[in-house]
Amino acid sequence: MGLSYGLFICFLLWGGTELCCPHPIWFLHGEAGGPVLPVPPTPRSPPVLVECLEAQLVVTVSKNLFGTGKLVRPSDLTLGPEHCKPLASEDTAAVVRFEVGLHECGNRVQVTGDALVYSTFLLHRPRPVGNLYILRTDPAKVPIECHYPRQGNVSSQAVMPTWVPFRTTVLSEEKLAFSLRLMEKDWNAEKKVPTFRLGETAHLQAAVHMGSHVPLRLFVDHCVATPIPARTTSPHHTIVDFHGCLVDGLSDSVSVFHAPRPGPDMLQFTVDVFHFANDSRKMIYITCHLKVTPDEQAPDRLNKACSFNKTTNSWHPVEGTSDICECCNQGNCGVPDPPRRLPPIDQLSVSQWQKLVSRKRRQVTEEADLTVGPLIFLGKAGDHSREGWTSAAHSSVSLALGLVVVVTLSLAAVVLGLAKWQRTISYPVLCSGKIWGSEGCGLEAEIKGIFGPAPGIYFLPC
């Protein structure tokens, strides 16, 4: 009785069941006189759906915007003050989509105490179709807002860190200092005077200063000799080729890489000196391409140091297995692999991301081109004995000339002395109290002395 009375009040006040039940009740008769079951209606999707993404705003608009069955045209819909157009869609599609950046289409941003608010609006501006001057829908402006908390993560995806520890930054960003020097025969000091004779050997040392960098291994990838400091000039002679093959050792020379290394950051090799035929400059420059790899990486066909041994007629590496040098005979050791296409950043693992960052930061400093020279040539090494004989002859001739000069100067001094001693001075001569005339003993007597004329009057007997 109480339930019937309550239902009666509901129908009396509202004329329906909305007060007593959140959804209308539809009564259906079941088959074969079954019980009556309430069935809820299908829920309707909103005409405008907004997705606030991390850096993008996606707006989905139903063509039945007003729910009257009259579909709006996509060309009548725009977004924001700049009237951005929707994405292209098929005419049969039931919705129209907009995808714009948070700062596009004139969107406004407002900072509140706890959120960033991006606001814009959806505008429906109907226009007559064809030659008709009538409209069947009304203009509409739908405000849209996206609220982003100022604290915390606004994305449901994992955050990819954009920082690395300070030590890692120092190690990966520290620039490498490559060097290529001409050394003395004992490798203990740099050669001060770069002069050579044909038949001698030049000692070259390549090195890299790593500082506090992770351990690296140095390789000489390519070397070429030229008469001027430009590796692309002509003529030229290749010394190292094919990513570390010392091909100069194939000719009548003993050019080799020295093994073992002094250290992974240093590589030494010798080259039999030469000069270019018909070149009056008698000097060469050697330009080498140096590169490094991680020390833990095993040498391979692209990173090696191989020398040719004429005794065994085979190639031998400074380190690593001998098969990495087999390509030196073929003259083709391959090319570096192209960079692999990596998945998007948000799909990389932490280790892949760290390797990618490390490789990007080191790619500028992992290689260098350096030039040493000029190497100046004086002649053949076999001409030392001839040079000694010539030098002795030149010394004898010089001594003889010196003696001749001394004798000549001595004779000149004697002649000058005699000339000075022969200078004459006249004195009067008295004889028996008178001066003789021309018929006497003589008018004058010439008296001379070793140290000049003797003073006084001299009497001579008549």
Image (spheres, grey):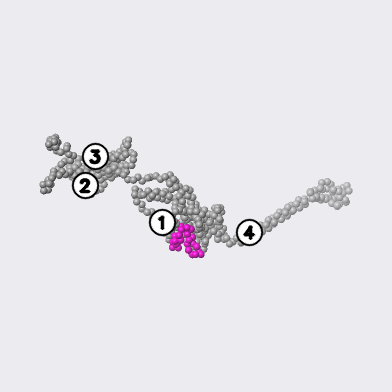
Find the distance from the CA under tag 2 to the CA under tag 3. 19 Å
Amino acid type shown at disc 3: Val
What amino acid is labelled 1 in the image?
A: Pro
In this rendering, the label closer to the viewer, 3 or 4? 3
Q: Residue furthest left?
A: 33
Residue that badge 4 annotates: 391
8 w.r.t. 203: above or below: above
Determine the CA span between mark 2 and mark 4: 106 Å
The percent coordinates of residue 66 (x first, y second) are 19, 41
Q: Nearer the viewer, mark 2 or mark 4?
A: 2
Task: State the residue in front, 276 or 209.
Answer: 209
Q: Give whichever of 84, 350 is nearer the camera.
A: 350
Q: Secondary structure at mark 2?
A: loop
Which residue bears the numbered disc 3?
142
Residue identified by numbered label 1? 336
Residue at the (71%, 55%) spot, across then down: 407
Question: What is the CA distance from the residue labelled 3 to the residue labelled 4?
Answer: 106 Å
In the picture, residue 409 is in which quadrant? bottom right
Label 1 crowding class (10 Å Cα cut-off): few <14, some 14-19, many 20+? few
